[in-house]
Amino acid sequence: MSAVAQWQWIDSSGRKVFSDRPPGAEVPEKNIIKQPNARAKSAEAQANVPAPAGTLVAPVAAKPGEGLDKTLMEKKKQTEAAEAAKRKADEERIAVAKAENCNRARQAKVGLDSGARISRINDKGEREFLDDTARIAESQRNQTTIDSDCR
């Protein structure tokens, strides 16, 4: 079962009050905005006019953000700051890894471009020397790494 506010009026502090009961006798007629079986008053009649204190049932906050729990807002700010710090740390870690990959690829390319014989160990544990096609393929792979990580 839900309750519907049938009465609306402006209290002495200028806030709108919503209730299912009529306001007290101290609330002037001009401050009553809505009542059962009646049309809402015009916008001019809804102006914040001070009046004697009425029965407050459900006052509406005058400004957005009023009434929010300050500790909740602080926790939200702390969480956002922690997430930003984590993102920054991740970006720094990725930048360091790219710089290391860049340096390794450049050193390997210099060795490949020097023309010296280069060997590596195959799956059987045997040493094999790179021929010209393998050297070109390895040089192209290193160049791809340099292009992506050395910006």
Image (spheres, grey):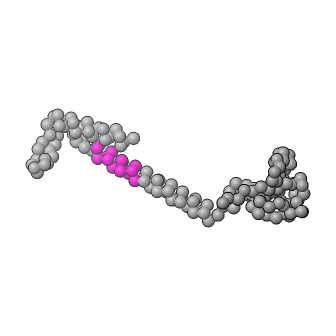
Residue 20 visible in the picture? yes
| Residue 119 x %, y % | 14, 44
The residue located at (79%, 64%) in the rendering is 56
41 sits left or right of 145 in the view: right
Along the line of sight, the residue nearer the viewer: 57 or 151: 57
Q: Quadrant of residue 6?
A: bottom right
> Quarter holding the N terminus?
bottom right
Along the line of sight, the residue nearer the viewer: 85 or 24: 24
90 sits left or right of 129 in the view: right
Q: Is residue 102 magenta?
A: yes
The residue located at (62%, 65%) in the rendering is 71
> Quarter holding the C terminus?
top left
Range of residues picked out in magenta: 93-105
The residue located at (85%, 54%) in the rendering is 32
Main SS class of the magenta portion in the image: helix
67 sits left or right of 89 in the view: right
| Residue 84 x %, y % | 50, 55
- Number of labelled discs? 0
The residue located at (42%, 53%) in the rendering is 90
Residue 110 visible in the picture? no
| Residue 82 x %, y % | 51, 59
| Residue 4 x %, y % | 72, 56
Q: Is residue 145 magenta?
A: no
Q: Quadrant of residue 106?
A: top left
Along the line of sight, the residue nearer the viewer: 93 or 104: 93
